[in-house]
């Protein structure tokens, strides 16, 4: 049996440049992994089937599951006949803007690469991952990166300054397609992506906090006022920077002083049941 950790990601910046002819949006995002992770267990089987088991009942166990798609794609790409049982121990909230499904798929690619002794590189796995979903390529590498194209072009960036990340997900689910569908690209206020990259290069926490931005945030907040309310509470409780991750609805706060973490965490628990206080990971996965 093979085990892989599948960490969540947050968007320090998320910018949309334009809508592409293929229907996708051209994006520019700075993403980093945090220490909130699913656990993915891969057990070989002789029956030639891909079986998904999950601790979370809302996670699909068929071809809709991105981990299933990852295993199926890898088998077809390398001519593998073996079956596999994939067990997902979920800790990342579902449909939260934290790339839980994408990270599970990426962990499946990395784990099956070991289980089936394929010898694929991270670059090869990331290329395959891009066929499954826009965030999968980043999740194959993990760490901190600038993602461009539709999210599949990955450029490694320095590890962010050490800090706490407080995540809060309201009791709603958000469709990424709906959020992008409601985005007016002509009225976007673009985040300071270059400033964020400079902040990471200089290990500058204050500059990092000043440079966070997400063009999808106003769209989601307009459709789901709970997200705006959660952000207001997090600011009021004393987070250094607050932003929605991905298309939402999870909101995160960056906190430098450990003494503030419990106050913010406990304050948010009064408004939201799913609250997590974690560290940034920020460093890349290493293939065995």
Image (cartoon, grey):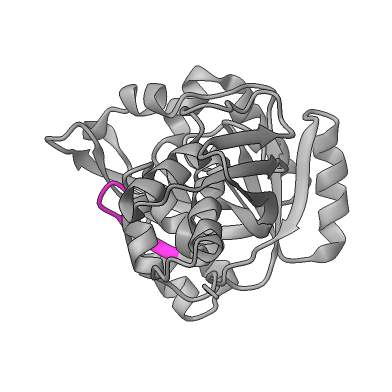
Q: Residue furthest bottom?
A: 202
In the rendered view of the protein, which quadrant contains the C terminus? bottom right
- Residue 179 inside the magenta-drawn segment: no
- Residue 68 in the figure: left or right of residue 161: left
Residue at screen point 64% across, 37% down? 231
Q: Overall secondary structure of the magenta stretch?
A: strand
Residue 235, percent from left and from top: 68, 44
- In front of the other: 252 or 192: 252
Q: Is residue 111 above or below residue 214?
A: below
- Magenta residues span 145-150
Query: At which x and y percent is residue 89?
Result: 72, 43
Corner quadrant of residue 2 = bottom right
- Residue 167 found in image quarter: top right
Going 31% across and 57% down the picture, which residue do you hit? 127
- State the residue in front, 38 or 242: 38
Q: Is residue 156 visible?
A: yes
Residue 209: x and y, percent?
A: 56, 60
Q: Quadrant of the N terminus?
A: bottom right
Residue at image location 70% in from the left, 40% down from the top: 90
């Amino acid at each position: 049996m093979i085990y892989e950790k599948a960490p969540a990601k947050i968007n320090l910046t998320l910018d949309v440049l334009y809508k592409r002819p293929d229907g996708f949006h051209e994006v520019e995002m700075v993403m980093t992994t945090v220490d909130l992770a699913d656990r993915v267990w891969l057990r070989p089987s002789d029956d030639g089937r891909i079986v998904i088991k999950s601790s979370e009942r809302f996670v699909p166990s068929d071809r809709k599951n991105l981990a299933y798609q990852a295993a199926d794609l890898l088998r077809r790409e390398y001519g593998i006949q073996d079956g596999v049982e994939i067990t997902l121990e979920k800790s990342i909230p579902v449909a939260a803007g934290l790339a839980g499904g994408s990270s599970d798929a990426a962990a499946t690619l990395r784990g099956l690469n070991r289980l089936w002794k394929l010898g694929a590189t991270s670059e090869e796995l990331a290329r395959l991952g891009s066929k499954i979903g826009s965030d999968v390529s980043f999740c194959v590498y993990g760490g901190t990166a600038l993602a461009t194209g539709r999210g599949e072009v990955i450029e490694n960036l320095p590890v962010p300054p050490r800090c706490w990340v407080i995540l809060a997900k309201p009791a709603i689910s958000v469709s990424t397609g709906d959020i992008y569908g409601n985005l007016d690209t002509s009225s976007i206020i673009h985040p300071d992506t270059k400033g964020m990259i400079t902040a990471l290069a200089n290990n500058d926490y204050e500059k990092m906090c000043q440079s966070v931005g997400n063009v999808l945030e106003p769209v989601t907040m307009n459709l789901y006022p709970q997200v705006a309310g959660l952000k207001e509470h997090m600011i009021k409780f004393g987070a250094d920077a607050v932003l929605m991750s991905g298309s939402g609805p999870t909101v995160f706060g960056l906190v430098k002083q450990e003494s503030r973490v419990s106050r913010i965490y406990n304050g948010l628990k009064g408004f939201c049941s799913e609250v997590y206080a974690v560290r940034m990971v920020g460093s890349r996965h290493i293939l065995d």
